[in-house]
Image: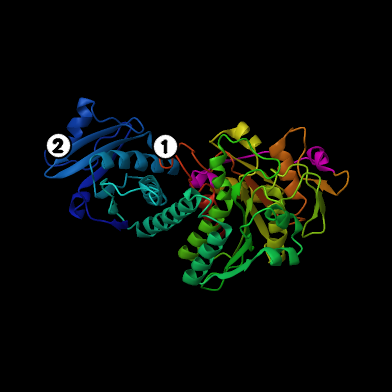
Amino acid sequence: MKVSATTEAPRSTGADTVVVGLFDGKGIPHDFEDGSLQALVDSGEARSKFKSLAVSHFEGTRVVLVGLGAREDFDLERARIAAAVALGRARELRARTLCWELPHKVSDDHPAALVEGTLLAAYRFTRYKKADDDPVLEALTISAHHDVAEAVERGRVVAEAANVVRDLQNTPANDATPTMLAEHARALASELGLECDVLGREQIRAAGMGAFAAVAQGAVEDPALITLKYTPPTPGATGPVIGLVGKAVTFDTGGVSIKPAKGMSDMKFDMSGGAAVLGAIEAIARLKLPVRVIAVVGATENVVGSGAVKPGDIVRAKTGTTIEVINTDAEGRLVLCDCLAHAIDCGAERLVDIATLTGGIVTTFGSVHAGLFGTDDDWCAAVSAAGDASGERVWRLPLDAEYAKALDGRYGDLINSNEDRKATSITGAEFLRKFVGDTPWVHLDIAGVAWNRGTEYAAKGGNAFGMRLMVELARGLTA
C-alpha cells in the first residue's frame, strides 16, 4: 500500500474516501460548501461518541465521520482504534484510496498511530486461500496543516514489519519451520546490512547449549539459533547494547508431557516471541535508529519422537547449570535460558526476552496485558512506558526468593517446572532469572496476547504483540 503525507486539503488528494474525526463539543473543522457534514452532526446522525460512524457524500467523494470522544482521552491507542474502525466502514464502501484529515491539536506521534491502525486493520492472511474479489486499499494519505511525513513514514515501516511478523505467525508449522525462520533472518540481513549467524543442531550442542538442544532432540526438523546484529549506519550510538531474545518453538506438542488435543493447532503460535524479535530488528534497521541491537531467536519444534527429552532427564545449560526436566511442556524456558546466556556472551548490556511461556499468564491477564518481570526498576519502567505508547500493554508481577525456592532441584541444580502449579508465571520468570546474572533484564510473557487478541486492528490470528513495543523501546533510548 502506498502511504504518504500531504499538506493539501483532503479533497485535493484525489482520494475516493475521506475520514474526518469528531471530538466532543467540537464542530466539523472543515466542512464542504453545502454544509452537509455539520448537518449530519446537527441531526444526530454523526456523533462524537468514540467509534461511532456516519457516512456522507459530496461531489463524488465519500466521507466517513468517526467519533473520537473527548480530546483529552484521544491517546495513541485510541487513534489506532479509530483508524481501524474507519477502515472497516471504508472497506464496506469498497474504498481503494483513503485520506485521513489529521485531527487538530494532537501530538506529533498521532499521524504514525493513524497509519499503524489502518495498515494493521487492512492486514489479511490469504496465502492458502483462493483469491476473492474484495477490493484492496491501495493508498493511504494523512492530510495535515504541517509536515507530518516523518511520523507517517515511521508508522508505515512499523506497521508493515508487524504484518510480516503476522505472516510468520499465521503460517502453519509444516511451512514455518526453524529453517524457514533462519532463511527469513538471512534475507533481512542481506537486505538491511545486518550481521547474521545461524547455528544448527550440532553447533548448538558444541556451544554447550544442552537445554536448548534437549528440546530439539525429538524433532526431525533441525533447530536454529539465529543471531542478528544491528549497528546504526551513522556513528554516535553511545547507549547500552540492547539484547532482544525470542522464543520460537514453531510447533509445541508439549513433548512427552503431551498437551490436550483441543486447541493444539494454535501451538503454531508458540514461535510468536521469536517472530516479534525478528520484526523489531527489521523495523529498527529500516528506521536507522541510533541504537545497537543484538537479536537472538531460539527456533525449534517440541515434538514427541524416539529421541525426545523425557521427564526426569537432566541437561546442562550453557552456563553450566544442570536442570532436571520435570515437565517437557515447560520447554520454552529451556530454550530461552541458553539464548539469554548467548546474548550476554555476544555483548548485550540490557535484555528483553519475549515468549509465550505459561498458561498461567492467560488466567491472570486474559488478552489485555502481557506479564512483565524484571530485575531493574528503571529498565522495567522503560519497557512498560514503551508498552503504553505502542498499545501493547504490560503489567509488572513480582519476583521473590520464596518463589525461586520452588525450583530447587533434587538431582540437579534446578527443576524446570514446579509440579504443584502454584504461581507458574512467576516461577517461570524466576527460572530465567538464574541465567542473566547482573545484566538488567525484563521478561515478557505474552501467552495471552500473541494471537486472537480481539482488538479492532488485530482481532484474530497472530498480531505481532511485542514487536512495536520493542521498536518504541529502542526509540525511547535514542530520545
Magenta residue span: 387-408
Q: Give the residue pinned by disc 1.
A: 72
Residue located 82% across and 59% down the image? 320
Task: Provide residue 322's location: percent of width, then percent of height.
Answer: 83, 53
Residue located 74% across and 42% down the image? 327
Observer-nearest of 243 and 338: 338
Residue located 62% across and 31% down the image? 363
Q: Quadrant of residue 415?
A: top right
Q: What is the C-alpha distance between the residues marked 2 and 1? A: 27 Å
Residue 35 position (above or below residue 251) = above
| Colour mapping | rainbow
Instruction: Choose the circle earlier in sequence order: 2 or 1.
Output: 2
Q: Secondary structure at mark 1?
A: helix
Observer-nearest of 389 and 362: 362
Residue 396 position (above or below residue 47) = below
Callout 1, which amino acid?
Glu
Q: Give the residue pinned by disc 2.
A: 35
**Location of the N terminus (image quadrant):** bottom left
Q: Residues within 10 Å of mark 1 (few under 14, many from 20)?
A: few
Callout 2, which amino acid?
Gly
Q: Is residue 351 magenta?
A: no
